[in-house]
Image (cartoon, rainbow, N blue to C red):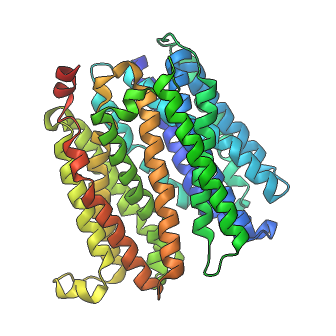
Amino acid sequence: MSRNFVFVTVCLGLIMVGISATSISVAFPVMSSSFQASTILSGWVLSIYQLVSIAAMPLAGKASDIFGRKPIFIGSLLLFSLGSVLCAIAPNIQTLIACRFLQGIGGGAYFPVATGIVADSFPQRRQQLIGLTSSIYPIGQIIGPNLGGWMVTTLGWRSVFWFNVPAGIAIVLLSVYFLKAGIKTKGSIDLRGAGLLTGAVLAILTGVSELGHFKTGASVAEWFLTGILFLTGFILLYVLISHISRAKDPIIDWVVLKGRPFLASNVYNFIAGTYYFGILSFVPLYAVKIFGMSTLKSGIVLTPWAVGVMISAGITSFFLLRWGYRKPLLVGNSLVIVGLFLLGMEPQALNLLGIHLDSTGLLIVLTFLVGVGVGTVFPAANNACIELMPEHVASITGVRTMFRNIGGTFIITIISLILNNASSLAQGFKISFFFICGLTILVFPAILNMPRGAQECVEVK
């Protein structure tokens, strides 16, 4: 019975983080206006959280393997809650960005440790329960825009941060009571590797983020600074890889990066991040600018997407042992490709195909289709290869989620550049959806290099 409360505690945290992510997006325009900050400076309120959380994921996974899940789990919640308090009282945009840095450490650390706790608590049902968590996070993404819109309108933008405080404290108390100390493994934190990883990720992704802000005619100084960021990041990345290949107990196990099935999984999760974050970030803008929807309706079109994710992730998780990994990945990937292709077509062309719906109905159907594909994919993508090294589930999940979020940062920048430089927004969105569609097609070889299912992982071991 206590194991069920552990799962509920983890899921409540997932919902809280999901609500926070989407409610802050709703509050962002009001937040920016209240500080009278430039668009580029304000954008760092969102970007810094994403960048720091990416770096925190593999570090937290490794730390939880060594020191146990419970202290790292509780620590991540406390950091997230403390960061939320400081964000809520921030007197200026610069302080808010710094506090989002702290919040990002807690938010990024949460995911791999939460997965590790679920895996440790349910060793016989590990695959189903890890897969089922894929259907929990979208609940927060459905609640977030609606709750955030109401809070911002009624209580002001700072309320979206205050909301996390009682929620975070309640989950910490549940964690203290229900979570066990857990199994610890021998080892130590690779501080040099941690520093190199953090520096490389921050430098490269900051450079990528800066590219997304470029308009036509960027200054020489802007190009020079971005070039320095990329150069620094790739140098640190080279040194990190060299260090990992030689270190006795590196921050990321070498096999998790280089081993054939792990490499295939990392490539796949990078691409999965492009269509996941591409849809989440740009479909509302697509609905407003191309289909002429109101802001309210543009938010509604993401609800069927999240519903599709929840339903299909729940079903796939239940049948994952029977279906294995490859079948859901192949089917889900195909559904995403069809949905992205149809999103890229003009409404008139869709009418020629026999699809006759108004703009709202059309986007609801297509986003639901992509959501079903995403939900079918994620339980398999989250579990593939874990059975090869089940004792390092948190570390593997941290690396996997890092690649997925890097893919998201990459695609947000690419789409921003395409929209900035296209002859029209309609043309820009068309190119963007077809570009993500092409990436998703190219990833099929990676799927075929991943294990068919848990049994094949056991045989390989």
The number of numbered badges drawn on the structure is: 0
Q: Vertical placement of 270 versus 76: above or below?
A: below
Left or right of 119, for residue 329: left
Q: Residue at x 48, y 49 (%)?
A: 405
Q: Residue at x 85, y 55 (%)?
A: 91
Observer-nearest of 334 and 409: 409
Q: Residue at x 59, y 41 (%)?
A: 236
Quadrant, the C terminus? top left
Report x, y in % for residue 115: 43, 30
Q: Vertical placement of 312 versus 341: above or below?
A: above
Q: Vertical placement of 285 versus 104: above or below?
A: below
Report x, y in % for residue 435: 35, 69
Which of the 4 image quarters holds residue 170? top right
Residue 402 appears anywhere in the view: yes
Report x, y in % for residue 418: 48, 75
Q: Vertical placement of 9 versus 273: above or below?
A: above
Left or right of 338, for residue 271: right
Quadrant, the N terminus? top left
Residue 167 appears anywhere in the view: no
Q: Residue at x 56, y 36 (%)?
A: 239
Left or right of 319, for residue 159: right
Observer-nearest of 196 and 69: 196
Which of the 4 image quarters holds residue 456? top left
Report x, y in % for residue 416: 52, 71
Which of the 4 image quarters holds residue 397? top left
